[in-house]
Amino acid sequence: MPQVSIVIPTHNRPEMLKKAVASAISQTFQDIEILVVDDGSSPAVTTALFGTDVPIHRHDSPRGASAARNTGLSLAKGAYTVFLDDDDTLEPDYVAHMLTFMKTHESDIDFAWPALSVLDVPTGRKSLAQNQRCMILKNHPARESSYEAAAYTRTTGMMFRTSSILQFYGFDESLAVSEDRELIFRMLSQGCGCGSLQTPLVNFFIHTGPRLSTNDNLLKQASCDAVIAQRHADFIAKHPLLASRYLNLLARRQRDAGLISEYRSTLKTLLTINPKDIRAIKRLAMSYLTLKRA
């Protein structure tokens, strides 16, 4: 049985997928399995793309990233499961570092993530993301800054203890975006632990190909995040820094989608949790000034 399963969901991005799979094959730690889940690509993904025998599990029609991840999770044999988006890549020592981190905190954390090296392909700009320290141990008090860090994590490059994520039935397939945050809020609110490495071990690419995180999907993003905010309102309200980060994100998406009433409502909710949130105060005031001027 492999120690680590790497699940790579994909849909109609064969050249990017090829690089993602190659980065998984090239890991310095080799006790792994790689599971590609083809979410109804046209044409279907075949092993000829990789030049090696990587298992491909196919959905006959597209069901979404969450469903593809859940299919991979149901097939995973490893004690730990990693999720990698098909347009991102792993550094060669990703598994070695992450596995050491997970095993060092064997009884205290259920999932972890590294920093991301972000490359904006059209502009060539490079930056870091997810490099804020997080350590939330089971049955131990944690700094609020750790909850703040957890609010901006992404699924790609996350490693889960397989038994832990299975207890929570994986990702919510009704959500088109932000399903990663919903799962994290769900697990943390039920007492799970998590942690992060500040080492950039995943390459995250911003590109011109199809993505859900684009302006064309603003309404979808805002709607999904609003569902999550309502579903996990009690958990969010307990953590002011997390609330500031997440609800400001939701408010921005609502504003950009033209949902002005919802935008103001979210900012007001945030200010009941964190009355000193300067960004929310300014945004709420400007929304009324702008409306009056109009």
Image (cartoon, rainbow, N blue to C red):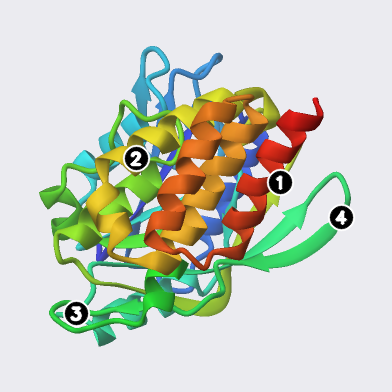
Work out which quarter of the rendered image holds the N terminus and state it: bottom left
Spatial CA span between label 1 and label 3: 33 Å
Residue 228 tag number? 2
Q: Which amino acid lies under the numbered mark 1 shown in the image of this protein?
A: Ile
Name the residue nearer the viewer: 36 or 122. 122
Nearest to viewer (mark 2 / mark 4): 2
- The residue drawn where x is 49% and y is 31% is 262
- The residue drawn where x is 46% and y is 35% is 177
Q: Earlier in the sequence, mark 2 or mark 4?
A: 4
Q: On the picture, is 209 further left or further right than 280?
A: right
Q: Earlier in the sequence, mark 2 or mark 1?
A: 1
Residue designated by label 1: 206
Spatial CA span between label 2 and label 4: 33 Å
User: Mark 2 near mark 1, Cβ–Cβ under 8 Å?
Assistant: no
On the image, the x and y values in percent for residue 186 come to 23, 51
On the image, the x and y values in percent for residue 246 come to 47, 53
Q: Which amino acid lies under the numbered mark 2 shown in the image of this protein?
A: Ile
Residue designated by label 3: 108
Quarter assignment of residue 63: top left
Residue designated by label 4: 124
Label 4 crowd bin: few (<14), some (14–19), many (20+), radius 10 Å: few
Nearest to viewer (mark 3 / mark 4): 3
In the structure shown, which secondary structural element does the residue marked by tag 2 occupy?
helix
Extreme residue in the bottom direction: 104
Q: Earlier in the sequence, mark 1 or mark 3?
A: 3
Nearest to viewer (mark 2 / mark 3): 2
In the structure shown, which secondary structural element does the residue marked by tag 3 occupy?
loop
Residue 159 tag number? none
